């Protein structure tokens, strides 16, 4: 038995690298997660979120850099790291051939619980996650949301101090999503540290104390959700002109009123502009009216992940055509 | 879902085990074997190769080749029954590797890998459970043989069954290794069959080796499968513990000594 060194960091990673063939899925990412916080990793499809989490969870070999969990080196002491981390992957990792109860019992046994303790723990967790009624059904008969919950329950059997959640709410309906958020908040209240990945800014906003934005394997921004949002304005005004030919003229008006550069959208007659204050929308609308420009629609929206990306990286989240070697400010 | 969780100790320094103990490893292997048995119960079609196949093959082989190889069916039975046991067990071993590969592609293996368990447990558990399959196949083949007129030595029969199951468990590590190395279940199946056919047919399973050309006979004579089959013949038919029994046990032990570490290593590498 060894004792882990005292450290305030639940996760400390420096220069993490993972290469698949010629592709750098994770390219020199630094990450520090403090004890007791919810840390969100935000990024679009293919950004490298899962790959990074898997390296930290000892599920993928680390190609470069250093990582430690509560001061325990991930590469050198994988067995110790596995005792500290509960992993809920992007795709439910439970056994299709077994029932919910059997799954939790099996994982409990593997974690060293006696048969009766494993049964008791399985029962408690099924109850807590609202799965008691379905407990004895096979997983193949579970809905996506139920699988997700069972998967999270399985990660909590040994009450690990650090929990990894890879896109915990992707594919969940709004109600189940809210429940998942509540569960995550409960975990943190009970002293766990949570590292979660998400594609949704609002999820990071709701849950995370701090957020890292990653794109194409690189960390492009880090801060509190509020800091991130301020970097793109608190919201976005989306305009659509009745006459697409008016778009250029409208852009000039917007620029004059807000001193902000509007972004033309792909559909005809559309333009978006960041608003520091949602109330400035009215001034834009009045100015357009005075210039004799007619709008088809106007909406004020909170910033989306796409806009955060646009602002931070200079390219859209879905924009695959941009040069891959593009260096972006961290 | 929102009820308060049992409060968690605010852990600052934890006592962590650097490695799983032997005791843990055994418990974890048994838990994984339990899972494999559940899987067998719930996917019974996966048992066809050790139930229906030996029934059909035994009857077919005995009647088709009996007259040609040994003059009549009765005198062929002591040759073909142990041969078929060897062949059926090898087929079952191939399934062990292929099913492991299929299983490893499933999400639940990500969890097994993320748990602080011995890396050998997810491999040794199914290997242990599959001994049930070799047992069923061996008993059924002997059963059909006896129904057709084969008269083995009672005590020797028990010893032969034990040896057959042990041989199955040992040889399965070759295919377990293919399972951990291969990229897809089909790939594993392909390689496994390529290895299984020579092991089965370049042996004394169906015909005596002395009619084979020398180069072939050399291979057939050192083939561990030949020794296992000879040992089963000696035990079951004559009730005798011969040197072939020792060679069979030694050969199986060598296979395990080589392929078990290889399998565990390649499984841990893939993490
Ligand atoms: N096993 C693998 N072999 C080859 N390439 C891989 C492998 N796993 C991931 N990649 C590649 O690495 C990149 C990052 O993938 P990753 O799954 O980490 O992204 P992600 O941020 O989790 O995306 P998503 O939101 O879609 O889950 C992708 O371009 C992906 O194609
Ligand atoms: Mg992912």
Image (cartoon, coloured by chain):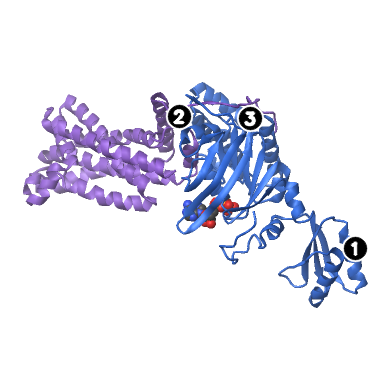
Q: Quadrant of residue B85?
A: top left
Q: Are marks 1 and 2 on the same chain?
A: no
Q: Secondary structure at mark 1?
A: helix
Look at mark 2 in the image and give the residue it sits on. B18
Nearest to the eye among marks 1 and 2: give it: 2
Question: Cα distance, mark 1 to mark 3?
Answer: 54 Å
Chain under numbered label 2: B
Please identify which colour was used for chain A in the image.
Answer: blue
Q: Residues within 10 Å of mark 2 (few under 14, many from 20)?
A: some
Q: Residue at x 53, y 28 (%)?
A: A4
Is the residue under label 3 in contact with that under label 2 (CB below 8 Å)? no
Q: CA distance from mark 2 to mark 3?
A: 33 Å
Circle on res. A127? 3
Outermost residue, bottom direction?
A: A245
Q: Chain of mark 1?
A: A
Whether residue B16 sits left or right of residue B143 in the image: it is right
Residue A309 placement: quadrant: bottom right
């Amino acid at each position: 038995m060894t004792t882990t060194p005292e450290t305030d960091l639940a996760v400390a990673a420096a220069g993490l690298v993972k290469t698949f063939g010629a592709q750098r899925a994770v390219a020199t990412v630094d990450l520090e997660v403090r004890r007791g916080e919810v840390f969100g990793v935000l990024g679009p499809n293919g950004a490298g979120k899962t790959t990074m989490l898997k390296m930290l969870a000892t599920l993928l070999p680390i190609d470069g850099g250093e990582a430690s969990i509560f001061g325990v080196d991930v590469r050198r002491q994988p067995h110790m790291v596995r005792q500290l981390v509960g992993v809920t992957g992007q795709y439910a990792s439970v056994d299709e051939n077994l029932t919910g109860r059997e799954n939790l019992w099996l994982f409990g046994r593997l974690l060293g619980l006696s048969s009766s303790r494993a049964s008791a723990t399985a029962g408690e967790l099924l109850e807590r996650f609202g799965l008691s009624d379905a407990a004895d059904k096979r997983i193949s008969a579970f809905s996506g949301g139920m699988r997700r919950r069972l998967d999270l329950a399985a990660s909590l059997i040994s009450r690990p101090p650090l929990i990894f959640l890879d896109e915990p709410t992707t594919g969940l309906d709004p109600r189940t999503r809210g429940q998942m958020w509540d569960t995550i908040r409960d975990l943190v209240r009970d002293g766990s540290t949570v590292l979660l990945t998400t594609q949704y800014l609002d999820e990071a906003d709701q849950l995370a104390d701090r957020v890292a934005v990653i794109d194409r394997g690189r960390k492009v921004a880090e801060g509190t959700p509020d800091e991130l949002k301020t970097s793109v304005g608190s919201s976005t005004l989306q305009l659509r002109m009745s006459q697409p030919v008016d778009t250029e003229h409208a852009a000039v008006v917007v620029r004059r009123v807000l001193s902000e550069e509007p972004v033309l959208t792909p559909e005809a007659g559309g333009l978006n502009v960041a608003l520091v204050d949602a109330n400035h929308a009215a001034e834009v609308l009045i100015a357009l009216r005075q210039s004799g420009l007619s709008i088809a629609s106007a909406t004020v929206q909170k910033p989306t992940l796409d806009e955060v990306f646009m602002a931070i990286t200079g390219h859209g989240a879905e924009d695959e055509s941009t040069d891959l070697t593009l260096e972006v400010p961290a | 879902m929102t009820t308060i969780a049992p409060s968690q100790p605010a852990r600052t320094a934890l006592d962590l085990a650097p490695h799983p103990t032997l005791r843990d490893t055994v418990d974890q292997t048994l838990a994984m074997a339990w899972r494999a048995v559940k899987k067998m119960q719930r996917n019974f079609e996966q048992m066809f190769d050790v139930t229906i196949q030996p029934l059909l093959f035994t009857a077919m082989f005995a009647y088709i080749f009996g007259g040609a190889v040994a003059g009549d069916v009765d005198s062929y039975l002591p040759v073909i029954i142990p041969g078929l046991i060897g062949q059926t067990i090898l087929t079952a071993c191939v399934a062990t590797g292929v099913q492991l590969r299929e299983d490893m592609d499933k999400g639940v293996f990500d969890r097994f890998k993320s748990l602080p368990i011995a890396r050998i447990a997810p491999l040794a558990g199914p290997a242990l459970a599959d001994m049930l399959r070799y047992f069923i196949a061996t008993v059924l083949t002997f059963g059909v043989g006896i129904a057709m007129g084969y008269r083995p030595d009672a005590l020797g029969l028990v010893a032969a069954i034990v040896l057959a199951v042990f041989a199955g468990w040992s040889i399965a590590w070759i295919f377990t290794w293919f399972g951990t190395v291969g990229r897809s279940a089909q790939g594993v199946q392909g390689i496994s069959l390529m290895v299984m056919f020579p092991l089965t047919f370049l042996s004394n399973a169906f015909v005596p080796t002395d009619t084979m050309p020398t180069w072939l006979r050399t291979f057939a004579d050192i083939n561990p499968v030949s020794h296992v089959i000879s040992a089963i013949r000696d035990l079951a038919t004559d009730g005798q513990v011969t040197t072939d029994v020792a060679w069979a046990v030694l050969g199986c032990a060598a296979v395990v000594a080589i392929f078990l570490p290889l399998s565990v290593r390649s499984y841990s590498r893939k993490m």
